[in-house]
Amino acid sequence: MEPHRINFYSENDFILEEQEKYGRWIEAVIASEAKKLEELSYIFCDDDYLLNLNEEFLKHDTYTDIITFDYSVGKILQGDIYISTERVKENSTEFNVSFNEELRRVIIHGVLHLCGYKDKTKEQSLLMRQKEEEKMQLFHVEQS
């Protein structure tokens, strides 16, 4: 069995539990979109860390829950996904869902961006939400 090419790092005190389960799920999602995984790094951080990235690289002076840097080539996925756990916590309260559910949504949102899904227009956002729901269901399917 080849090693996971999914890395989880933290720039704050957040530690992702069940990393192997998340890794298998992310790999299943990528396979379900007929893509191949090269390497994927998740970096968990706070609002200010992500705000600095947003300003520096995207010229956006706003807080966000996720920024995805896509280094993919064709169907071979590679990227860095930065997630503000502060923003995820706030959003989970706002949307009345558990922190873990909101975190899974954001984690898979980044993967869907790498798979080519966008969310700039209303139509794109609707498709993105449908894909998030579909892929979140895969988390609960027992992986062997």
Image (cartoon, helix red, strand yellow):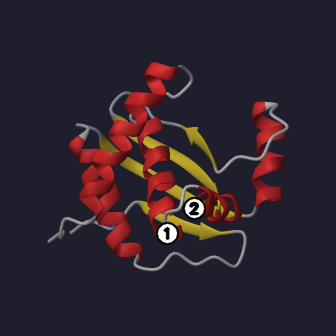
Residue 96 point in image, percent of width and height = 53, 61
Q: Quadrant of residue 47?
A: bottom right
- Give the number of marks: 2
Please name the amino acid that badge 2 sits on. Ser
From this view, report whether residue 118 is shown above or below residue 141. Answer: above
Q: Label 1's element?
A: loop
Residue 78 point in image, percent of width and height = 46, 44
For this view, does 48 lie left or right of residue 83? right
From this view, report whether residue 139 is shown above or below residue 31. Answer: below
Q: Is residue 132 visible?
A: yes
- CB under 8 Å between discs 1 and 2: yes
Q: How dense is the environment of label 1, judged by Cα within 10 Å: few (below 14), some, or many (20 and up)? A: few
Please name the amino acid that badge 1 sits on. Ser
Residue under the point 38% across and 35% down: 115
Estimate the spatial distance between the alpha carbons at disc 1 and disc 2, rounded to whole Å.
6 Å
Residue 65 point in image, percent of width and height = 65, 51
For this view, does 144 lie left or right of residue 37? left
Q: Label 2's element?
A: helix
Q: How dense is the environment of label 2, judged by Cα within 10 Å: few (below 14), some, or many (20 and up)? A: some
From this view, report whether residue 9 is shown above or below residue 67. Answer: below
For this view, does 47 lie left or right of residue 3? right
Residue under the point 26% across and 38% down: 33
* Image quadrant where one finds the C terminus: bottom left
Q: Which residue in the structure is indicated by mark 1?
A: 98
Q: Earlier in the sequence, mark 1 or mark 2?
A: 2
**Closest to the observer: 72 or 104?**
104
Q: Is residue 116 visible?
A: no
From this view, report whether residue 135 is shown above or below residue 72. Answer: below
Residue under the point 57% across and 49% down: 80
Q: Which mark is residue 92?
A: 2
